[in-house]
Image (tube, rainbow, N blue to C red):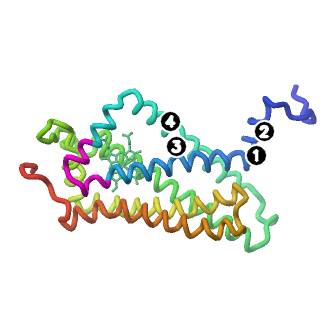
Amino acid sequence: MQDVNAPPTAASMPARLLNRSIGKKILMSLSGLVLMAYVVGHLIGNLQIFVGQNALNAYALFLRSIGVWLSVIRAFLLAMLIIHVWFAIKLYFENRGARPIRYKRKVYQEATLSSRTMIWTGIGVFLFVVYHLLHFTFIITNPRYAHLEDALRRHDVYSMVILGFQNYIISAVYIVSVAIVGYHIVHASKSMFQTWGLNDTNFEKILRPVTVIFAWLIFLGYLSIPVAVLAGIVKLPEGVI
Ligand code: HEM
């Protein structure tokens, strides 16, 4: 049987850390940072739609052409997503189980409000990603987009995105979802500062507005795509129905 009073060994340290809230929070913030980096990179790629059909389709083809690396990146991102969601659920139930009486009233209210909204916006982002993958990656929700090709016989991602957003309901789903993504990022950054002990420091006073501006840029960047399609700023190329 394990001696609970025995001093921690190097091998038992990671397991002990993971059993503590702070260990879970560290993993959540690291996986969250990776996912956030993806959201930024993905936005930059998607904004190629404003350059034109050739730019967006070339970018999509480039991603596919990296072959095995694409699979490695996808597997890594999936692992980050699973870690993030798994520990979010664990922390949520741990916090629910914690006795609120231990906190001063204001701190308790702030902490629960933040974690409550985080779990719901997190679920919102997760459901959006599932729908989004079925929509644009696996092309299951609108299978006719799978056969779209441009003049160079590349998959016509450009027309696929425009045809998708010409549907008001789909655009509305995306607009609400990217607003939730932005909101999640703002609150996530706040709890990340707490995890790294940066809250209530001068450093946080500078970082806080930076993260709010960052979240707004992410939101407005993603929002610009369905809005540009609906406003007719980005149009289907000749010959595409
Ligand atoms: C206006 C908003 C968005 C547009 C137009 C868009 C567009 C696309 C397209 C076209 C693909 C498929 C690429 C391909 O297979 O060639 C894709 C994949 C993906 N998108 Fe988005 N996206 C948007 C927002 C988002 C957001 C906000 C997230 C994350 C929260 C996200 C996460 C992903 C993921 C995880 C994939 C799968 C990447 C892969 O194939 O490995 N997207 N997106």
Q: Nearer the viewer, mark 2 or mark 4?
A: 4
Q: Which residue occupies the extreme left position in the image?
A: 239
Q: Nearer the viewer, mark 3 or mark 4?
A: 4
Tell me the residue at 56%/70% (across/down). Answer: 209
The label number, if any, that marks residue 81 in the structure image: 3
The label number, if any, that marks residue 76 in the structure image: 4
The x and y percentages for residue 40 are 44, 53
The x and y percentages for residue 114 are 62, 65
Kindly identify which residue carries mark 2.
16
The Cα atoms of the two marked residues, 2 and 3, are separated by 22 Å
Label 1: few (<14), some (14–19) or many (≥20) C-alpha neighbours in 10 Å? few
Location of residue 234 with respect to 11 vertically, above or below: below
Q: Secondary structure at mark 2?
A: helix
Nearer the observer, 67 or 141: 67
Bounds of the magenta span?
A: 47-58
Location of residue 12 with respect to 196 vertically, above or below: above
Q: Amino acid at mark 1?
A: Arg
The Cα atoms of the two marked residues, 1 and 3, are separated by 20 Å
Q: Amino acid at mark 2?
A: Arg
Which is more N-terminal, label 4 or label 3?
4
Kindly identify which residue carries mark 1.
20
Which is more N-terminal, label 4 or label 1?
1
Q: Amino acid at mark 4?
A: Phe
